[in-house]
Structure formats: C-alpha cells, structure tokens
Image: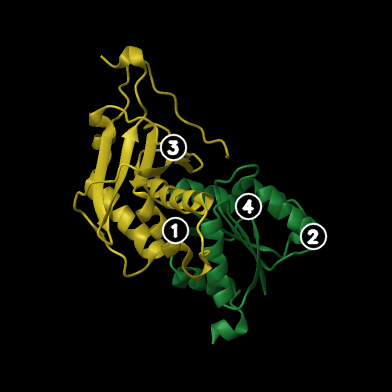
Chain colours: A green, B yellow
Amino acid sequence: MRALVIDDSRAMRRIVSGTLEGLGYETRQAGHGQEALDVLHAGWVPELCSIDWNMPVMDGLQFVSAVRANPAWRAVTLMMVTSEGEQGQIVRALAAGAHEYVIKPFTADAIRDKLALLGLLPQEAAL
Amino acid sequence: MTETRIPRRRAGDRPPVITELLDEAVVQEIADQAWAALVGEEEVLVPLPGEVPADAVSSWVEVLGPWTGTVVLACGRRTAADLTRALLREHAPAELEDEDVADALGELANVVGGNVKAVLPGPSALGLPEAGTAPAPGAAADTCRVDLLWRGQPLTITVQGAALAPEHEN
C-alpha cells in the first residue's frame, strides 16, 4: 500500500512516514496541499493521504475538498493528522470529505488503530 | 490557513485574560502528552524552574480568537538540538541545520499550541509555527508560564496575551 504524508513540518513528516513504513506502507511526502495535489496529478495516487490542517500555500481542508472534487481520486482515503482538536474542526473536516481524524500528539498505536478501522492495515501488519 | 469566523466582541466587553481560562497544570498536562508522544514515551518534564541560557531559542504559534496571544516554547540551543534529535530519532542528520531545529521546535509549539487552543473558548484560529525571537509578552495578568526541566535542562512554555499597544500600557 502507498501513503502520501502531507505536513509542513519535516520532523512530523518523518515521524508519520516512519510509523506508516513500520506498518508496511510505501510513502512519499509533500510540504503542503498544492505539492500533494501535484503528486496526485503526476499519477502517484496512494491508498491513503495523511494530512495536516494548518499549512502554507494550501491547507489540509482545501486539499481534502480538492481531492473529493475529482472522481478519479474517489478511492483515496483521507486521514487528517492535526493539532486542531476542537469538535467543530473535526466536524468540518469530516464534512469536507475526510474519513478519519487523528489529533496530535498521537502514538503509533493510535495511527495503527485508525488504519485498522479503515481496513487499511497492510496484511503483514494486521496479523 | 482556512478562515475561521471569530465572533465580534460587543463594545465595552472586556477580553478574557489567559489566567481566567487555564492554569499552569493544564499547560503542563498538554506538554506532558506532547513530550510522551513526540519526544519519547519515557521522556519526563519535571516542573522545576531552571535558568534558561542567554542563547535561548524560541518557537511559537499564534492563537486568534476570543483570547488572542501566542504559545511560546523557549530553551537553550543545546536543549533545542537534543529535542530535535529526539523527535527525529534515527532520521536525524549527523549535522543538524538551524532549519532542522527551527522545524522541530516549531512543531512542538504547534502541537502544544493547538491543544491549548482546544481548551480555550472558541472558535479560534491557529497560526503557522514560527521560530526566532519570540513576540514581546503582554500584561503579566495575561500570561501563564510553566518552567520545566527536560533531561535536567531548563525550558519554558508561556501562553501569553498579545502585547498591548503603547497607548494602552498605562
């Protein structure tokens, strides 16, 4: 499985990517929503996008809306991973088309549990 | 950043000060959770004051809403470098660049700031993390500061109201 990790913090991209790679994912990284859209337009369409909310250029909510507006990317699962923890923000993200929401700080187990709920744990990690 | 509607305050309303909204224990709890998840499960923040070195580096995020101010993380350069290596673990480069340190400290401020925002009355917006010379503090009554030791090294987390305009200072 493939995952695109979208966060303006390099440290956080490395942390999330490390967690996903530990579960068997192949990952790529993008520093903001527009850079992530460029990756998708170039043909690298993953099963999962891990998306920060507050980023320069294009934020996570705008990215979610852009992905949802393109039927060709309907199969991409969108998981917000953000420090925006209020209920209202979670509702906004889910209403825009995100499938899951993880609040920073998170543990590797929290990511694993969310992916299990989504049916997106690679087989070897699900055993 | 996505626009968040901030309710207008009526004329004559006094804006809240941070000490009416949270206390040091709340900030410490948020920091503890951030450290355990990002820095390491065994990493402990001890609530003891220490002298932050003169070469302190700072990172912060702005909170804009019914309460407006910044959440500032400050520590010495050595502490900042150690924190960066702890965050990046095996991905840490042999030689840390200033950009690596600013990024890691900024993300810590972002996570702490985002969780501080979540306990404040909303809706509020969170700015992007910044690093460098922290914004000037506001009034003492609008400041909540925790002094901590991490691996015996001092650091501070300060939730501070926006500095007052000069004509309002007296």
Residue located 79% across and 56% down the image: A41
Task: Please name the residue that numbered disc 4 is placed on.
Answer: A31
Residue B65 versus residue B107 in the image, above or below: above
Residue located 47% across and 52% down the image: B101
Give the number of the mark in front: 3 or 2. Answer: 3
Task: Please name the residue that numbered disc 1 is placed on.
Answer: B84
Circle count: 4
**Label 1 Cα neighbours within 10 Å, binned few <14 / some 14-19 / many ≥20:** many
Q: Which mark is residue B62?
A: 3
Whole-number angstrom distance, CA of label 3 to CA of label 2: 37 Å
Say whether marks 3 and 4 touch (CB < 8 Å): no
Picture coordinates of residue A9, whole percent (x, y): 54, 53
Subunit of label 1? B
- Residue B145 in view (yes/no): yes
Whole-number angstrom distance, CA of label 1 to CA of label 3: 21 Å
**Label 3 Cα neighbours within 10 Å, binned few <14 / some 14-19 / many ≥20:** many
Subunit of label 2? A
Tags 4 and 1 on a common chain: no
Tags 3 and 4 on a common chain: no
**Label 4 Cα neighbours within 10 Å, binned few <14 / some 14-19 / many ≥20:** many
Q: Disc 3 on helix, strand or loop? A: strand
Residue A78 versus residue A121 in the image, above or below: above
Subunit of label 4? A
Give the number of the mark in front: 1 or 3. Answer: 1
Give the number of the mark in front: 4 or 1. Answer: 1
Whole-number angstrom distance, CA of label 4 to CA of label 2: 23 Å
Front residue of B77/B61: it is B77
Q: Amino acid at mark 1?
A: Thr
Whole-number angstrom distance, CA of label 4 to CA of label 1: 18 Å
Residue A111 versus residue A125 in the image, above or below: above
